[in-house]
Amino acid sequence: MPLKLTLLVLPPLCICCVILHVAGVPWNITGRIAAVLVAFLVVIGIWDQLMRRRAAHAEQEEEPSPDRNMAAPACGEVAFGLEASAIAGLPVYRYEQKRDGGAVADECAVCLGEMRPKEVVKRLPVCTHLFHEGCIDVWLRSHRTCPVCRTPVDVGEAVPATVVEPDDRTHAN
């Protein structure tokens, strides 16, 4: 950060000093102006570093407990999705079309396909969005949020559901 700041600030500062000297301002006044500008930039740089540390510290305090499959990646790590056990823990249903007389079926936001009756779907526990089982499983392997609303997926808040047995699953592709 200090090197970048130096490389970004020094050339314009030197140009300003030369312009002031060419305009007839004595070097001692130009030097004072340059010193004030450098001091101002140093103070801003220190303030920025303090704010970044404070924000990082606040994020660490808000981080959920490690046993909840929601731990944020450490600085420099690549963010991955949920663990396979967490994905498998999401409620699985057989899709039933809405009975309110609506002709439009729900749509999977991952593949953009319509949900068909008796098709195996998963509902995310917090936001309650529906997806094809295979589609949301693939999504959650590389993301920790709902593809529609970006709400973090929290398996700990899953509502009890009638789970479809693995041998009864049928996939319509």
Image (cartoon, rainbow, N blue to C red):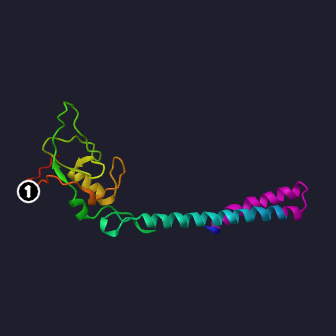
In percent of width and height, residue 32 lies at: 83, 64
The residue segment tinted magenta is: 3-30
Task: Give the residue displayed 22% in from the left and 54% down from the top.
Answer: 159
Total marks in image: 1
Q: Which residue is mark 1?
A: 167
In percent of width and height, residue 2 lies at: 64, 68
Task: Give the residue displayed 44% in from the left and 66% down from the top.
Answer: 61
Q: Is residue 29 a member of the stretch shown in magenta?
A: yes
**Viewer-proximal residue, 5 or 95?**
95
In percent of width and height, residue 160 lies at: 18, 54
Please identify the quadrant where the N terminus is shown.
bottom right
Task: Give the residue displayed 17% in from the left and 41% down from the top.
Answer: 116
Q: Main secondary structure of the magenta part?
A: helix
Q: Amino acid at mark 1?
A: Asp
Q: Quadrant of residue 90?
A: bottom left
Task: Give the residue displayed 27% in from the left and 47% down from the top.
Answer: 128
Up/down of 20 relative to 85, above or below: above
Up/down of 116 relative to 162, above or below: above
In percent of width and height, residue 163 lies at: 14, 54
- Left or right side of 123 for 78: right
Q: Is residue 12 a member of the stretch shown in magenta?
A: yes
Q: Quadrant of residue 100?
A: top left
